[in-house]
Amino acid sequence: MKLLNTTVKNKVLGSMMKIIDRERANIIKENKKDLEAFNKEDQALYDRLIVNHDKVDGMIRAIEEVREQDDPVGKLKSEVVLESGLKVTNKTAPFGTIMIIYESRPDVTIEAAVLAFKANNKIFLKGGKEAYNSNVVLEKCWHEALEANGLSKDWITLLHINRQETQEFLKHPPEQLDLIVPRGGERLIRFVKEHSTCAVLVSGRGNNFLYVAEDADWEKAVKVILNAKTDKISGCNALDKVLIDKRIPGYRDKVKELDKILEAAGVEVLVDRNIKQTLGQRTEIPNKDIWYEEFLALKIVMAAVDNVDEAIAMINEYSGGHSASILTENTDKAQKFMEQVDSAAVYHNASTRFTDGGQMGVGAELAISTDKLHHRGPLGLKQLVTNKYYVFGDGHIRT
C-alpha cells in the first residue's frame, strides 16, 4: 500500500470539513428520510440515527481533531544494533484495509473513515440500512474531498449490500482485509466471527456494572448512578447493573431512596431476591440470563452483595468487559477493585459514561474495544496502526 504524505492527508481532511459544512442542509435533509422510515419504538437506535446541526458540527470537530493529531505512521518504537552488526528498527505501519460494520449512527461514517484514512488505511464502511440515505450523502462528501486532492475514492468505500451479501463479502472479500471491527451487539459479533477470514476486533457490547461499597459516600453514589444510567441510554458505556453492599449504613432506606430516584427518572428497576425483600413491588429478575444482558434502555438491575470480593466475582462472570465502577472512600479497596476487575475501563467514584475517546483524551474513536489484542478501550488514531521491523545488514547470513 502506498504511504501518503501527511500534508496530503491533512489537505483531504481540510477539504472534507469545508464540504460537510457546505452540504449540511442536504445531509440533514437526507437524514430526515431515514428518520421518517425508522421505527421509533427503538429509542436507543433512533437517538443514534439523528443528524442535526449539532451533529454536523460534531462531525467537523472530529475531523479537525484528527487532522491536528500527529501522523501515527512511521513512528519509531525501538532501535537496536546487534552484536552481528545488524541494525533492527521497529516502526508503526498501517494495517492496510479495514472493514467496520455498524448500526444506525451516521457520525461513524465520518469518525471511522477519518481515523482509518489518517492512519493510511483503506476502509470499507458497512452501515445499517436504517441510515442508508445519510451514509450515501456522507460518502459522496468523502469522495469529493479525495478526488479534489488527486486521490482515488477507493480509500473510503460505503458498502451497499444486504446481510447475505455481507456474509459472502466476509468469506470472499474482493481484496485482502486486514482487520474487521463489528460495532454492535452479540448477534453481529457472532455473525462476523463465524464468516470472516481475518482478524476481528470486538467492540460495542456494554453491560456495565457499578458497585456501591459499604463506605461509599451515598450522595456521590446516587449522582453517579443516575448519570451513568440516564445520560445516554444508547451508549455502550451506559450503566446496566448496580451492586449494593449489604453492610452500608441504613441499607434498606438507601435502597428505597435510590429506587424512588430511578423511578422518577423513568427507569424500570429489576431486582434480585435480596433487594426484593426491601422493594416488594419491584419485579424480580426472571433468570440468570438477565445478568449477561446489555439493556440500551431506561432499565437497570439492582442487587445486593456481601463484600467487594463478591462484587468483583460477579462483574468478571457476567459483564461485557467494557466498563465497571466502584463507589468507595477507601483507596485501598478501590485499588483492589480496579486491579482485579477484568474490564477495559475501571473507575473509582466516577460514571462509566466517561469511556469514550473524546472524554479519555484519545480523540475521535473507531470503537471501544473489549478485546485484549491488539488494543483495549477507545480505539483512536494511535491505535489504528500495527508495527513493522526494518532490518539493515551488509551481506549478513545466519550460521
Image (cartoon, rainbow, N blue to C red):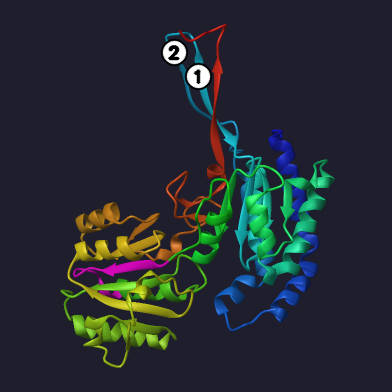
Q: Residue at x 79, y 69 (%)?
A: 25
Q: Is residue 41 visible?
A: yes
Residue denoted by label 1: 88
What is the number of the mark on residue 82?
2
Mark 2 crowd level (few <14, some 14–19, many ≥20, 10 Å Cα)? few
Which residue type carries mark 1? Val
Q: Which residue occupies 48% across, 8% down?
A: 85
The residue lying toward the viewer, choosing from 395 and 230, is 395
Q: Is residue 53 left or right of residue 310?
A: right
Does the magenta-highlighted stretch encompass residue 91? no
- Asked whether the viewer can see residue 364, the reply is no
Helix, strand, or loop for circle 1?
strand
Task: Find the distance from the CA under tag 2 to the CA under tag 1.
Answer: 8 Å
Residue type highlighted by circle 2: Leu
Tell me: residue 294, above or below residue 116. Answer: below
For the residues labelled 2 and 1, say whether their Cβ atoms are less than 8 Å apart: yes
Using residue 267 as the reference point, say whether residue 277 is left or right of it.
Answer: left
Residue 212 falls within the magenta-colored stretch = yes
Q: Which portion, as a residue range, is magenta?
A: 207-219
Q: Position of residue 8 (x, y in %)?
A: 74, 38
Image quadrant occupied by the N terminus:
top right
Q: Quadrant of residue 243?
A: bottom left
Quarter holding residue 130: bottom right
Query: Which sits in the foreground, 70 or 368?
Result: 368
* In-front residue for pair 126/378: 126
Residue sitting at 50 percent across and 57 percent down? 203
Q: Earlier in the sequence, mark 2 or mark 1?
A: 2
